[in-house]
Amino acid sequence: MKQELEQLKQAFSQALEVIESSDALEALRIEYLGRKGKLTDLLKGLKDLSPDDRKEIGAFANEVKIDLEAQFARKQSELASLFAGKIAQEEWIDITAPGIEPEDGNLHLTTQSIEEIADIFTQLGFVRVRHPEVEWDWYAFESLNMPKDHAARDEWETFFIADGDKIMEGKKGKVVLTPHTTNGQVREIEKGQLPIRMMNINKCYRRQADVTHAPMFHQFEGLMIDKNVTIAQLKGVFDFFVKRFFGPDREVRLRPHHFRFTEPSFELDISCNLCGGIGKVDGKKCRMCKQGWLELGGAGMVHPNVIKAGGLDPEVYTGFAFGWGVERTFMMKSGMNIADIRILYKNDLRFLKQF
Ligand code: DAH
């Protein structure tokens, strides 16, 4: 039996030698040292030995068992460090290497300006809203005192939405892409929440594409309606905006004009920053403005018909409105001279990254 134990020990050592995985090692342990393993099996024979032999062989068997367990433990730690070494090699990273920095994006020039503009008017209590870009003829024109087929509409070269060859019509007229943010006025009045201090900033669309016109552009529209609203307040709001957006030395001017949806109507001008509003630089005509002023946008006292179209009584309520282009406004601020305005919307990163 002693011999058998010796053989067992040898066989175990030999088998251990070729083992390369912890699964195989565990299988070997079960085979030899497990409850139903080879050693247990062998020791079953002890009971048939004489008491002296049993004592001697028993002690020897114990030594063998301890020896196998020690061999097993050694192999186990050997495999573990081998495995750790392999992982360390395969998954090695240099934690001191500089990271890959994701590229920072930036807001589009137009978005930056919209935020700046909205921020200034918010300080005066105007609330930013957005009215539809896809609009009915009624809100874009008719309710603004521009009846069907009126010649004034020609100025707003409008895109109509067609289904096949047929221009679509809804419950408030033909469906258009709004050519100006003035479409928000009657929609806002209809909400019936007074006083109104609206700032509608949105995309507008016109059938114009050349170096100074993009078919899609942005406007912002201010509307204030309450009792006793005056032109003086319009001028005050305009002045507040201009001084904050363009700088404290810029002056404002209201120049008579004509719009169908305001009465009286004005063009809003700001003093030129190149000549300081004089119209001359070093005795010569200012090349930027020629006469001291730059035109920014349109404004006026809301026409009674517009107030009526929104469901209010123009005898009780009055208001002012203004609207102008976002792109024009930020280009005037920076003095930026873009050869073709359409570059703004061509997604050319070389251009956009500059702002
Ligand atoms: N909607 C006009 C345009 O697109 C601009 C405008 C003029 C807006 C006068 C107004 C206004 O609110 O009162 O040219």
Image (tube, grey):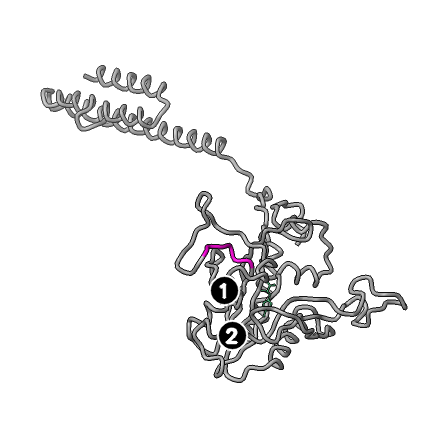
**Quick one: label 1, few (<14), some, or many (20+) residues within 10 Å?**
many
Compared to residue 138, the image places residue 249 above or below, namely below
Q: Quadrant of residue 73?
A: top left
**Which residue is at the front of the view, 292 or 176?**
176
Q: Which residue is mark 2?
A: 197
Q: Earlier in the sequence, mark 2 or mark 1?
A: 1
Compared to residue 253, the image places residue 146 above or below, namely above
Residue at point 65%, 53% (across, down)? 213
Compared to residue 179, the image places residue 260 above or below, namely below
Residue at point 61%, 76% (across, down)? 264
Q: Which residue is mark 1?
A: 142
Residue at point 36%, 18% (across, down)? 18
Q: Which mark is residue 66?
A: none
As drawn, is 103 to the left or to the right of 211?
left
* Residue range highlighted in magenta: 174-179
As drawn, is 45 to the left or to the right of 239?
left
Q: Quadrant of residue 235?
A: bottom right
Q: What's the residue type where badge 1 is placed?
A: Glu
Residue 91 magenta: no
Q: Position of residue 121 (x, y in %)?
A: 57, 71
**Which residue is at the front of the view, 67 or 165?**
165
Q: Does the closest atom of ligand 1 sit within 8 Å of the Cβ of label 2?
A: no
Q: Position of residue 120 (x, y in %)?
A: 59, 71
Q: What's the residue type where badge 2 is placed?
A: Arg
- The residue lying furthest to the right in this view is 283
